[in-house]
Every structure is written in C-alpha cells, then in structure tokens.
Amino acid sequence: MFDTVLVANRGEIALRIVRTCRELGIRTVVVYAADDRDSAAVELADRAISIGPASGRSYLNIPAVIEAAQWSGADAVHPGYGFLSEVADFAEVCESHGLAFVGPSASVMRDLADKSSTKALMREVGVPMLPGSGDAVETADEAKRVADRVGYPVIIKASAGGGGRGMRVVRSAGDIERAYQETRSNAWAFFRDSRVYLERYVEAARHVEVQVLCDGRGNGVALGERDCSVQRRHQKLVEETPATCVDRATAARMGEVAVEAALAVGYVGAGTFEFVVDEDGDFHFIEINCRLQVEHPVTEMVTGVDLVREQLRVASGEPLSMRQSDVEFRGAAVECRVNAEDPERGFVPTPGTLREFRTPGGPFVRVDTHGYAGYRMPASYDSLLAKTIAWGPDRAAALDRLRCRLGEFRIEGPGVCTTIGFLRDVLADPVFRGGRHTTSLIQDMTTSEQTAAHS
C-alpha cells in the first residue's frame, strides 16, 4: 500500500478520500486554491499545499499538482471526481513522474473518453446498444439521414461530453439541422471538441448505472446498480439502490455485462457503466465513467464495501479484496444531493458564509459534507454542499428515514438557499414513492405545480 497520497480535488470528496487514507495509515496531502484555504479537507490532511489563486483552473493546473506531489513525497495521486479525474494526459504525466494514478491507465482512459468510439468498442464485446450513428456525424445532412433511419425522437450528444452537458433532444426532422449546429457549438464551448453523434431517444426512460471494480490481475466484480433517474437538465439529484425498474435477474445480467466489458478493455479501478432502461425493462449502454461517482455512498451502504479503499488497493498493485460470490446486498439506500441553490429562481447557485450549519444524524444515516458553521462557500465551484444518504431494510423505510433526516438540517447564512425543501417534495411525490418515475419526473412535477398555481 502507499505511504503518501496526494488528493487532487476539493470539497466533500477530498475530505472523504482523506478519511479512508487515515484509516489505512496513509499520509495525505491536499492541494488547494486560495479560496479553499479554510476548507475541512485542508484542516484534516497531514499536509496542505497551495496551487494557485481562487479559481477552478487552479485544480486543473497539472504542473502545479505534479510539483506539489513531488515536493511532498507522495507516491500516488487520487483525483476524486471532476477536475482532472478523467483527463488521460494527467494520468500519463503522473505515470511518467513515478506517481501511481488512482484510476484506469491513460491509454484505457483515452480509449473510453470519446463517447462515439466507446460505443463502437462496447458493441464489439456485445454490450446492448440503442440504434444510432455509431461514429461521429460530420454534417447536418448526415445527422438527418441517421435520424430518419432510427426514428424520432433522437438525442444529439457531444462525443467528448459529460456531466449532462452538450446534448439536445430532437423530435422532428424540421429541427434537426438547427439542433445539430447548436449541439456542435455547445460541444466546442464545453469541451473544445465539436464532434457529436446521434442515437434514439427513449422517452419514458430510467437512468441506471452499474458500479464495477477491477484489479490488474484480471479480476472484476459488480457491486449492484443505482437508479439515477431523478434529474434536472440531465444532472442527478437523487440516487438509489436497488433500482425498482429492473428485476433481480436483469440487474445481475447488467452487472455481468459491465464486468465482462471492463475486463475486455483492460480497465483497472472503480468505474461506472451507465445504461438507459426502456419501458419494456430492456437496458442499453450510454457511457462509461472512468472514476468514482458522486453517488458512490449508496453502493457502500448496501454492500459494506469501501470503494476508495478498493481503489487504493488496486492502484498499488494489490488484488481486489473480494470475489463476486463475496458481495452481499442488504436493504436499500437513497442519496439526496443538497446543493446551495435556490429552486424558486431556477436553481441559481447561492454561495455565501454559513452562519449556522447543523447536519442530521441517527442510525443508518450518512452525511458527506465539507460544510461547517463559519464556512465561506466559494462562488467558483459546483454548488454541492452535502450528500445525505439513508439506509433501510427496504426502499420505503429508506425513503421515510431520508425525508425525515433532511428536515433536521439547519443551514443559514446571508443569501444562502438550499434545495432541501425541494428534495423533500421529491421524496414525497406519489409517482416517485411508487417507483414509477422516469427521467422526466422533475419536469412533470414543475408542470403540475405551474398548472395548479394557474387553476
């Protein structure tokens, strides 16, 4: 195992990685931008090193991160999620400087970074796919031909996309040219890569992902599925396991497919295979996330597996600590992302100083947060403030517990709003409670509220 790990991230995920490292007796180094000087991760780490001014660009400064790792004597770098976690060049630079990168190799990451080429790779190993273009489409006319062939509606996606950005649903041939050009423009703005591809859009869809772990010795396990269908603008708000939209046999098959595909491409580490599940319960591949996911705690709650610990094990060359037959699933877990946003104003971020910050507790509840009373939330970063996860012997118990615990939060500060009230409404929604929701749930709830307000 490693002696010293540098955490190349911030916020709750940096704190979460530091905690597992401490349990393993591993020294930790946290890098930080100027506006994160007083963060909880900086305080808990064995060492903290400034890497730049108050800006998200500081966390993307590869030379500064590498210099901090070398200067501190780190022998590994954990990128968390976001920022440099899926940047193949960063993984390659780490490797060239003798630093273990906690994640897949740079070559595998490159193979899987492009969404259209990844689909071609997955098709070769037999992963179920939605009909679409396969490769990137070069012109609006080609996009129209593909759409005519697979049938409307279609979705146009950025080949280098991620995080719910760079995609557009098209419902008729008359809209295809404008949508194609706009998606290409957005793809360039977001990712500096204007290539896009098309696939059939599933209307009443569920978004289900499978957590896999693979080591460098040809071993892989699936740790169950997570339903991430509660989204706004393609960004997740509520995640749960197990998924209500697939039976256990289908869920097991999804896991088998994901592990087989991961091992076929030489994947090492924690990764997530994302699928769309249609009304018939059939699943179709979307993409692979080559990193730890924000929603990983729900998997940890039902399996008892520390995913960061396993990441560190396999990155250091050790085998996985389990086989598939060792994995047991107990009960259900649900996570809500508490963001510093104002739902009444279109979820606009509301950073500020937390005058009061009190989190819930009690049996079978976990809160991953970097917030504390007096903490000043910077405006430069994602608005995620706390992830609240509840376990129960079944889904209903987990939902009841989570909704109750969300009501225990006390978060106050000048101008600071949170999504807690909105999340409690989601958890109480009868469609969601009945497990009948799709990715359109938030839109449907908003439309119903607007209709009621005008009636």
Image (tube, grey):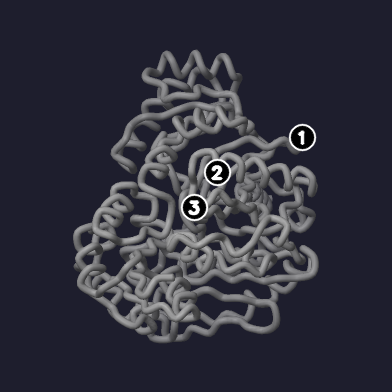
| Along the line of sight, the residue nearer the viewer: 141 or 25 | 25
What amino acid is found at the position of numbered circle 2 in the picture?
A: Leu
Of badges 1 and 3, nearer the viewer stands 3
- Tell me, for residue 216, which label it has, or none: 3
Q: Position of residue 130 (x, y in %)?
A: 60, 29
Q: Is residue 353 visible?
A: no
Q: Residue at x 72, y 52 (%)?
A: 243
**10 Å neighbourhood of mark 2: few (<14), some, or many (≥20)?**
some
| Along the line of sight, the residue nearer the viewer: 111 or 30 | 111
Q: CA distance from mark 3 to mark 2?
A: 9 Å
In the rendered view, would you say 82 is above or below 414? above
What amino acid is found at the position of numbered circle 1 in the picture?
A: Asp
- Tell me, for residue 263, which label it has, or none: 2
Q: Are marks 3 and 2 in contact (CB under 8 Å)?
A: no
Q: Residue at x 65, y 40 (%)?
A: 257
- The residue that disc 1 covers is 280
Q: Earlier in the sequence, mark 3 or mark 2?
A: 3
Q: Is residue 248 left or right of residue 344?
A: right
Classify residue 60 by image quadrant.
Answer: bottom left
What amino acid is found at the position of numbered circle 3 in the picture?
A: Gly
* Badge 3 element: loop
Q: Earlier in the sequence, mark 1 or mark 3?
A: 3
Q: Position of residue 454 (x, y in %)?
A: 64, 51
Q: Is residue 347 left or right of residue 101?
A: right
**10 Å neighbourhood of mark 1: few (<14), some, or many (≥20)?**
few
